[in-house]
Amino acid sequence: MSTPVLETTTLTHEQKLDRLAEVAIRVGLGLAAGQELVMTATLDTLPLVRRITEQAYKAGAKLVTTLLADEEAQLLRYSYAPNESFDYAAGWLYDGMASAFKGGAARLAVAGGNPALLSQEDPEKVGRANRAVSKAYRPALELITRHDINWTIVAAATPAWAATVFPDLDADEALARLWDAIFAASRVDAPDPVEAWRSHDAGLHRRADMLNEKRYSALHFKGSGTDLKVGLADNHLWLGGGMTAGNGIYCIPNMPTEEVFTTPHKDRTEGTVTSTKPLSHQGTMIEGIRVRFERGRVVEAKADRGQEVLQEMIATDDGAGRLGEVALVPHSSPIAHSGLLFSNTLFDENAACHIALGQAYSSCLKDGDKLSKEELTKLGANESLIHVDWMIGSGEMDVDGITAAGDAEPLMRKGEWV
């Protein structure tokens, strides 16, 4: 079964939800017949979750297991739980997820939580709780970052998220506008969404192939508040769009996606960088990030809002203050063109060039998924409990590729590919 080609103006909201669910399963996840699916979501996303479950079973899923988070219950922890609680995470749950992935299950996350859920809570407790979850989730996360399994992330509009994006609209209109933006960015509005994704995927692969042919040793970002040189890992590979996971299944990990990305060398980032969009991190908004790197490590970090949470994040472990990803996104991407600040990394990272602190993707290194941790480290891949993307690109950003001989070649000018 495939998505019918229809005039999109005739589609109802429910039909668009069905299309998004089908695209998530058949294009984003590439779910195989007989495969299990582990899905995570919040309670507010249930209408989409149920449609994804339906599409998964239609695609032949053996079993769909959904873990639903209640954000209101999460807030109760910060009001009433004992202090020592914040150093604990449900390790048994994350061990179970890792076991499922090792057994062949696919992973799908539905993004849509309240971007500012924990903004009023004690930053020290938020940091401790995040660190505990990061440690517990590590075995499962490694299978994802190594792309051993097929996985994807899609989004669902929720009232709290909609109120953040459209604070001046009433609740119903804000929710409808956010759904419209999600459908557009996810190409559900196209006459044939599956074909639209295939064409877009091919374009991202062409861009990554060009960069792989260039073999730049570093990238130089120059813009307002930014003069940053990011050295690239030895034997790095640029990726974009979909990829074949270690289990042989082709998937597109992020829906939407507009980026091409690779692995920086953990010791070769120098200079200063300023964020161009707020970062929503684990329910806390961090705005106005300014960071200085020396020999790959963050030596100074400030934020206009969320400073303590930023510091806690960087202090997670030795690798949390080093880069694990660098990505190039044109300022004319559909998400940037929408003019919206989504306050959700899945969308905002696809509106601007970005970097990520923490864990590197081994798949962005030649034969990286076959290498040991020691071999990955020798090539420059960073290791950490976290992987946090934040946006540094804009319509004023210039990017040069630095050759092995030290020559600079223009890659982007004013946020656009040369």
Image (cartoon, helix red, strand yellow):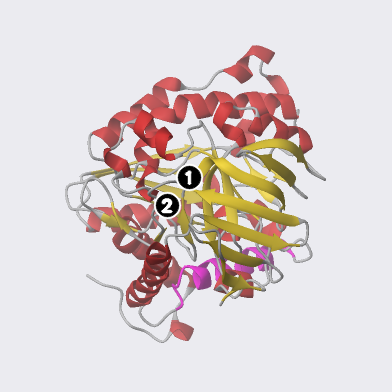
Give whichever of discs 1 and 2 has the lower sequence position.
1
Mark 1–mark 2 distance (CA, rounded to whole Å): 7 Å
**The quarter of the displayed image where residue 238 is located:** bottom left
Residue 331 image point, x, y percent: 62, 71
Q: Are marks 1 and 2 in contact (CB under 8 Å)?
A: yes
Secondary structure under tag 1 reads strand
In the picture, the disc for residue 49 is 2
Circle 1: residue type: Ala
Vertical placement of 203 versus 41: above or below?
A: below
Circle 2: residue type: Val
Residue under the image location 78 percent in, 43 percent down: 303
Residue 269 image point, x, y percent: 60, 45
Q: Does 302 sit left or right of 126 as displayed?
A: right
Vertical placement of 253 versus 121: above or below?
A: below
Vertical placement of 167 versus 235: above or below?
A: below
Is 179 in the magenta?
A: yes
Quarter of the picture containing the C terminus is bottom right
Secondary structure under tag 2 reads helix
Is 150 in the magenta?
A: no
Quarter of the picture containing the N terminus is bottom left
- Magenta stretch: dominant secondary structure: helix
For label 2, the crowd category at 10 Å Cα-Cα, with few meaning under 14, some 14 to 19 and many 20 or more, is: many
| Residue annotated with mark 1 | 41
Residue 204 visible in the snapshot = yes
Residue 63 image point, x, y percent: 25, 42
**Which residues are drawn in magenta?**
170-189
**The quarter of the displayed image where residue 299 is located:** top right
Q: Does 416 sit left or right of 167 as displayed?
A: left
Residue under the image location 76 percent in, 32 percent down: 308
